[in-house]
Amino acid sequence: MPELKEGLAGVVVAQSRISKVFGEEGRLIYRGYDIDDLAEGASFEETAHLLWHGELPDEKELQAFEDELASRRRLPDDVLDLVAGPLAEAHPMAALRTAVSALASEGPEPAATPEGVLAAGADILAKMPTIVGAHARARRGLDPVEPDEDLSHAGSFLQQLTGERPSEEAERAMDLALVLHADHGLNASTFSARVTASTLSDAYSAVTSAIGSLKGDLHGGANANVMRVLETIEEQGDDPVQHVKRRLDAGEKIPGFGHRVYRTMDPRAVHLKDWSRRLGEATGETRWYETIRAIEDFIREEKELPPNVDLYSGSVYRCMGIDIEYYTPIFAMSRCAGWIAHVAEQYDGNRLIRPRAEYVGDLDRAWQDIEDR
C-alpha cells in the first residue's frame, strides 16, 4: 500500500515552469524572474503576460495586452444585473464565484487547449474587478461605475470600487498587491483549477473551482483576519502586545505569521510592509502600521515566526478605504492570472489528476432487510 500523505504534503503531482517558492531562502520567482525585481519594475499587466506567455512583453505586446483587457472589462447586462440584484447580499466570494460561472453562458464554450484558455482567461481576468466593484457598491445601495479603459487594471478597479479616480500612490499600491499575489506554486486554489482542467473541463469551470477553494479561511481569508484582530485591539483600547499575548496564552494562532512553505520572511511581505507605512503616512492612518509593527516584533521574539504576505496587505487595503470582506476577492482578482497560466499548462500534455484514498471503513457487513434494521 502506498504511503499515506495527508493533505498531499510533500507530494509532487506536476512539473511546472510558472513559479517557484524557495522556502528556506524566502524567495519567489515567476518564470525565472525574482519577485523583488517584478515588484519594483513590473505592472500587473506585464506580470500576467509573463505568467501566460513565459516572457516579458515588449512595448507593442504590452500595449496590445493592456488594450485587450481594457476592452473586455464591461460586464454583460444580465451578469451585471445578477451581481447588483440577487447576489447583492451574498458573500462577496460567493457572488464572484457565481458571476464568473455565469460569464460562461455569454458565448461558445472555450476549447480545452492552451490557446482556448488564454482567450477565455483574458475575459475572466478583465471582468473580475468589474464584478467585485459592482458587488461592493450594490451592497452599499450605490450604482455600479463604468470601467475606464484609459486607466490601468488596478486604477480602473479602484475607481469602480470607490467612484473616485485613485491617487497615484493608491493605484501603485494596488498594482503592486496584484503583482505580489499573482501566483505562488501549487497552492490549494491553483491545484483545484488544475484538477478541474485535467478533466478537460473549460477555463470558466476551472476558475470557478479555484474561487471556491480560495474562499476558505485556511487559504484566502488570513489578511481579513489580521485586520479583524487590529480592529478588536482598537475597539477595546488594548495594548497590542498584551492583546496578542493573551490570545497566545489561550492557545489561539495569530494570523499573518508563519507559512506552510517559507521558513523565513515571506518576500512579498517586505514590499507590503513598506506600502503599509507609506499609505498610512499619506492618509493619516499610521496606527495600523504601528500596531502591526509592535505585534511583529513581539511574535518574532516570542515565537520566532516571520510575517507572511497577509500581515500587511490588509492594512494597505484599509488605507485605501476598502472593506474587509473584499480582501479575498482582491486576492482572487490577482491569483486569476496564475490560475489561467496553470490551466493552460495543465492542458498542454494533460493527464487526469486522480489520487487514491486509503479505505479505513468496515468490511464484509451482512445485509439486513429493512424490517430487521
Image (cartoon, grey):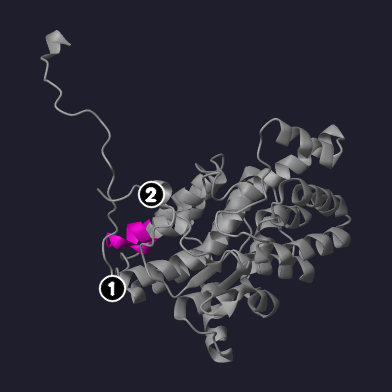
**Residue 45 to residue 212: above or below:** below
**Residue 322 to residue 232: above or below:** below
Along the line of sight, the residue nearer the viewer: 266 or 116: 266
Q: Quadrant of residue 173?
A: bottom right
Query: What is the secondary structure assignment of the residue under circle 1?
Result: loop
Rendered residue at 38%/66% (across/down): 343
Quadrant for the C terminus, please.
top left
Q: Main secondary structure of the magenta part?
A: helix
Q: Quadrant of residue 248?
A: top right
Q: Residue 203 colored magenta?
A: yes
Q: Which kind of residue does numbered mark 1 sit on?
A: Gly
**Numbered mark located on residue 5 in the image:** 2
Left or right placement of residue 17 versus residue 39 in this view: left
Query: What is the secondary structure assignment of the residue under circle 2?
Result: loop
Residue 5 visible in the shown view: yes
Q: Which kind of residue does numbered mark 2 sit on?
A: Lys
**Numbered mark located on residue 222 in the image:** none
Along the line of sight, the residue nearer the viewer: 351 or 73: 351
Nearest to N terminus: mark 1 or mark 2: 2
Rendered residue at 66%/61% (across/down): 264
Residue 137 visible in the shown view: no
Separation (CA) of disc 1 from disc 2: 26 Å
**Residue 301 to residue 126: above or below:** above
Residue 360, given in percent of the width and then of the height, sits at 28, 34
Neighbor class of circle 1 (other Cα within 10 Å; few <14, some 14-19, many 20+) is: few
Left or right placement of residue 372 versus residue 156 in this view: left
Left or right placement of residue 54 versus residue 232 in this view: left
Neighbor class of circle 2 (other Cα within 10 Å; few <14, some 14-19, many 20+) is: few
Q: Write the start and end of the magenta stretch as one range.
A: 194-205
Residue on which the image places disc 1: 349
